[in-house]
């Protein structure tokens, strides 16, 4: 009664945007955040407000400050919600610590700020202790959690889910029925068999081992080429490394120069609310050898544009 199957996590966000949030509402999100999610909110007429992060995740004190400024302008009755990716954050790769999670829940409860928790990358965590979803700390029904099979198993299945209180699920289910008459039963059957047979658990072991290997190789490559010239995250899962240059770099020029040499970059500006002098690098979609070769090209290009 508290679970709704959707056609991917992005549809879950679309359902929430059109049925639970009114146009003109403010969506607070990590700065930076996942561009596709931000675009869903923007398409529904939402206002976006970035909240600073540190190496332990979204800062509750920064959110408190942002809420204070928001109320001063909009009034206490204005609509607002928090969208967060606490585990294997896209694009930074940061996983929110347990202390930050508790601080965030306390802040949102005190300010009556609902939370949309995007856990699409939860199963890709390969650190020492799997972090608990924010929903497990939710005693007031204020957290709506999203999940997906797209990141960990198969994007083509288009299977996602929403976990929320029953009245919310019922409302979203009504809207979904009007949209597409339900998610593919064949895809649900295939994924359910994969889960109940134990194949998914065994598959995750191998997947996380390979991601761990590629993460370690990526760290070595970055240390060889960018030590002293940039700093970067050391993710405990997911797909991405967030690299920030020590000196100002025009990422648009960097993008064009790297593209001419066969390396496609994701400038950090497209994920952030302002320029951030950063890049999102994927260690998951390339072999360690390909990542090393690409970082070598990137280092040469950076020397040329600086």
Image (spheres, rainbow, N blue to C red):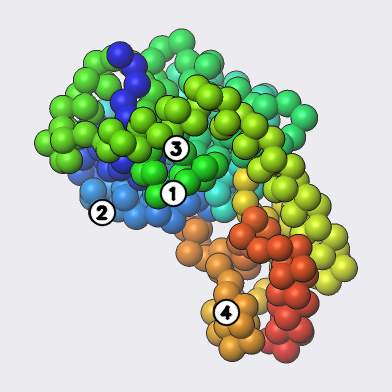
Instruction: Identify which residue is drawn at 27% across, 38% down.
Output: 184
The numbered mark at residue 233 is none
Instruction: Identify which residue is drawn at 16% across, 40% down.
Output: 179
Q: Is residue 226 left or right of residue 264?
A: right
The front one of 153 and 281 is: 153
Please tell me whether mark 3 sits on a helix, a strand or a loop: strand
* Residue assigned mark 1: 155
- 247 relative to 26, above or below: below
Query: Viewer-nearest of labels 3 and 1?
Result: 1
Q: Quadrant of the N terminus?
A: top left
Query: Viewer-nearest of labels 1 and 4?
Result: 1
* Residue assigned mark 3: 148
Q: Position of residue 66 (x, y in %)?
A: 47, 40
> Rounded to the nearest whole Å, what is the CA distance between mark 1 and mark 4?
27 Å
Instruction: Identify which residue is drawn at 34% across, 16% down.
Output: 2
Q: Position of residue 238 (x, y in %)?
A: 62, 46
Q: Is residue 184 left or right of residue 53?
A: left
- 187 relative to 113, above or below: below
- 270 relative to 116, above or below: below
Q: Quadrant of residue 200?
A: top right
The numbered mark at residue 255 is 4
Label 1, residues with CA under 10 Å away: few <14, some 14-19, many ≥20: few
* Residue assigned mark 2: 43
> Rounded to the nearest whole Å, what is the CA distance between mark 3 and mark 1?
9 Å
């Amino acid at each position: 009664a508290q679970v709704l199957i959707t056609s991917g996590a992005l549809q879950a966000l679309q359902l929430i945007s059109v049925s639970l949030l009114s146009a003109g509402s403010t969506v607070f999100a990590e700065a930076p955040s996942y561009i596709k999610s931000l675009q869903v909110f923007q398409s529904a007429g939402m206002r976006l407000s970035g909240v600073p992060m540190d190496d332990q995740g979204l800062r509750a004190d920064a959110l408190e400050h942002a809420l204070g400024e928001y109320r001063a302008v909009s009034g206490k009755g204005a609509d607002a919600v928090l969208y967060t990716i606490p585990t294997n954050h896209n694009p930074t790769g940061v996983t929110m610590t347990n202390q930050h999670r508790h601080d965030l829940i306390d802040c949102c409860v005190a300010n009556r700020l609902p939370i949309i928790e995007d856990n699409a990358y939860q199963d890709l965590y390969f650190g020492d202790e799997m972090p608990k979803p924010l929903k497990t700390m939710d005693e007031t029904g204020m957290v709506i959690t999203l999940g997906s099979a797209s990141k960990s198993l198969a994007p083509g299945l288009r299977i996602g889910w929403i976990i929320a209180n029953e009245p919310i699920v019922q409302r979203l289910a009504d809207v979904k029925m009007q949209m597409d008459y339900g998610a593919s039963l064949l895809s649900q059957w295939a994924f359910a068999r994969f889960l109940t047979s134990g194949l998914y658990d065994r598959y995750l072991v191998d997947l996380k081992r390979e991601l761990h290997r590629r993460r370690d190789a990526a760290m070595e490559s970055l240390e060889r080429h960018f030590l002293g010239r940039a700093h970067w995250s050391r993710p405990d899962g997911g797909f991405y490394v967030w690299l920030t240059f020590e000196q100002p770099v025009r990422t648009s020029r960097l993008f064009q120069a790297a593209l001419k040499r066969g390396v496609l970059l994701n400038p950090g500006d497209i994920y952030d609310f302002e320029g951030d002098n950063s890049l999102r690098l994927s260690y998951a979609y390339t072999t360690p050898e390909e990542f090393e070769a690409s970082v070598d090209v990137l280092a040469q290009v950076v020397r040329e544009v600086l």
